Structure formats: structure tokens, C-alpha cells
Amino acid sequence: MRNLINNYEEVFAIVLFGIGFVTLLFHQNLIKKIIGLNIMDTGLYLFLASMGYIYGGDAPIYAENAGFYINPVPAGLVLTGIVVSVSVTAIMLSLSVRLYKRYGTLNLDEIYLEARNKINER
């Protein structure tokens, strides 16, 4: 239990990832799936940032002893991931708008059935 309290950032990141995964898995609404994917991304970024942080360490610019500084690579990965995540979210939302205009719903089961019926009509 003491280990969980000391690593509360990692625990919270895993909980966020789990909430996003369950949302992605069990909801049929496309907007809810996009929100679940964003929650999963947030959990992953929190996990990466917490793994790269060293308590008591300095920024690499200010570190006088070379062994005790915060690694900047996880922060760079998190920033790159956030940019990619925002881009992917924008594309998913624009495709959701197109799907809604074409099928009149965002429920994936209904979209699948309607698309299948259109293919069978041809």
C-alpha cells in the first residue's frame, strides 16, 4: 500500500488509461469513442512524464553533477504525442461529421447496417 501512495502519479495514469479503454470498448457512439481515446492518451502522457521525472533533480541546463538531472527525452516524447493526438482527434471529429451527414447517426452499429444495406442494394 505504501508503494501505491508513493507512486500515485503512475496509479492515476493507469486508472485514466483504464477508463479510456473501457469507454472505447463498450460505447457504440463515435464521439464517446473519440473521448475515450483522448482519455487513454492523457493517461499515457501522464505515465511517461512521471517516469521521466526525478525528485530532487535539476533541469539538464542547471545540473552541476552529470548524474542527477531530469531526463528531457520523456518530456519531448509527451509534447510530440500531444501534437499528434490533437491532429488525430481533429481528423476523427471531421470524419464523424461526414458520417453523421451521410447516415444521420453516430452509432457504429447503425452505420454498419446501413452501409451494408447500401452495398447489398447495388
Image (spheres, rainbow, N blue to C red):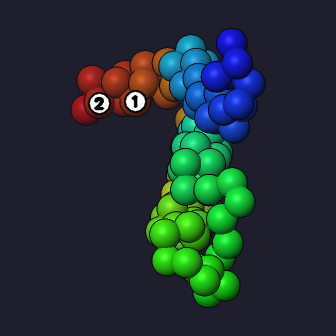
Q: Residue 115: which numbered mark, if any?
A: 1
Percent coordinates x, y for residue 33 in the rendering: 59, 32
Front-lying residue, 107 or 92 = 92
Residue at the front extreme?
65
Q: Amino acid at mark 1?
A: Ala
> Dot 2: few (<14), some (14–19), or many (≥20) neighbours within 10 Å?
few
Q: Quadrant of residue 121?
A: top left
Q: Quadrant of residue 113?
A: top left
Q: Amino acid at mark 2?
A: Ile
Q: Is residue 121 left or right of residue 99?
A: left
Q: Quick check: marks 2 and 1 in contact, CB under 8 Å?
A: yes
Front-lying residue, 51 or 69 = 69
Residue at left offset 69%, top offset 54%: 55
Residue at left offset 62%, top offset 80%: 63
Front-lying residue, 84 or 12 = 12
Q: Residue 119: which numbered mark, if any?
A: 2
> Dot 1: few (<14), some (14–19), or many (≥20) neighbours within 10 Å?
some
Residue at left offset 66%, top offset 65%: 57
| Secondary-structure class at tag 1 | helix
Percent coordinates x, y for residue 122 in the rendering: 25, 32
Q: Label 2 to label 1, Cα distance in Å?
A: 6 Å
Residue at left offset 68%, top offset 13%: 1
Q: Residue 100: which numbered mark, if any?
A: none
Residue 83 makes an appearance in the image: no
Against 20, is 100 above or below?
Answer: below
Q: Quadrant of residue 21?
A: top right
Percent coordinates x, y for residue 36 in the rendering: 62, 33
